[in-house]
Amino acid sequence: MRLSQILFSQGFGARRECEGLILGGQVSLAGAVCDDPFFEVEAEGLSFAVRGELWPYRAKALVLLHKPTGYECSQKPKHHPSVMSLLPMPLRVRGLQPVGRLDEDTTGLLLMTDDGALIHRLTSPKKHVPKVYEIVTIEAVTDRQIDALRFGVILHDDPLPVRAAAVERTGEHALRMTLLEGKYHQVKRMVAAAGNTVQALHRSAYGVLTLPAELAPGQWCWLVGPQAVLGPGLESTDG
Ligand code: URA
């Protein structure tokens, strides 16, 4: 692939802008400046630097963001900035979107990708990708509430009881709950239906992925391929 095409595919602007970056000596390969936009390189496995910053080539981008509070997952946010604004310009240009949504006041693991097929696979109700939430409640958690969440609560948009795949008390006012679906405000509505109120909500795991301890709120890191999220076991249940 031509170097200018690579930059274009990775979100570094219009074709002319990418050529300009290369002609201006801003792009290096293996530590050496390459000022030829037509230079042919193997894209797969390539790393290149733009203005000294190293970028891996990714045909499709998949990143994990530690979502802080105060950001909306919508592309047209109403009251707070969008999570997109936490990503660098090339990833924004590529049009990465959140995989599902976290509320503005929810923190934790948020996947973002420009791979529409992957978003569909991960959010498909058939897929049953587990998501783990750490919940702080206003009232003390009771055994009755734990049982209600485990055996199922009624939410207004579903005639059938919705249950947690796993639920455990982690403190007097704290719960850990694993959900296989991703319904609108599901955790908050389930906890409310069980007779308590969510004060703070954090997603600590998605599929086989857990939020890396070293990733501070607002920071992101690359992931390599859907297996990083689904693992071999979940991968085989595709349908
Ligand atoms: N459930 C909620 O209620 N809110 C979230 O942000 C995620 C799951």
Image (tube, rainbow, N blue to C red):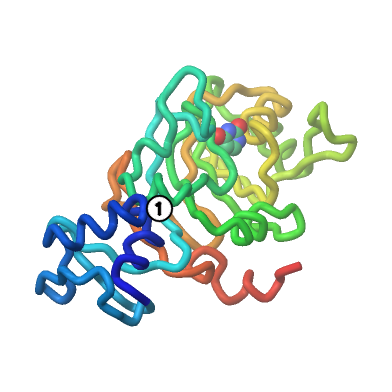
Please state if 102 lies on the left or on the right of 188 as rendered: left
For label 1, the SS is loop
* Residue 7 placement: quadrant: bottom left
In this figure, which residue is indicated by the disc labeled 1?
A: 211
Q: Is residue 172 visible?
A: no
Q: Quadrant of the N terminus?
A: bottom left
Q: Position of residue 92 (x, y in %)?
A: 40, 45
Q: Regarding ligand 1, which quadrant of the image does it lie in? A: top right
Between 138 and 29, the one lying in front of the other is 29
Q: Is residue 95 visible?
A: yes
Please state if 238 lies on the left or on the right of 220 as rendered: right
Taking the view exactly as shown, the residue that stands out farthest to the top is 79
User: For the point 52% across and 20% down, which residue is it?
Assistant: 138
User: For the point 38% across and 50% down, which residue is it?
Assistant: 91
Q: Position of residue 77 (x, y in %)?
A: 50, 25
Please state if 193 lies on the left or on the right of 42 as rendered: right
Number of residues whose C-alpha sits closer than 10 Å to that of mark 1, classed few (under 14), some (14–19) or many (20 or more):
some
When the figure is inspected, residue 121 is found, relative to residue 30, above or below; the finding is above
Q: Position of residue 48 (x, y in %)?
A: 23, 68
User: For the point 62% across and 46% down, which residue is it?
Assistant: 167
Between 133 and 82, the one lying in front of the other is 82
Residue type (three-letter) at the residue carrying disc 1: Leu
User: For the point 48% across and 69% down, which residue is it?
Assistant: 225
When the figure is inspected, residue 83 is found, relative to residue 23, above or below; the finding is above
Taking the view exactly as shown, the residue that stands out farthest to the right is 159
* Residue 237 placement: quadrant: bottom right
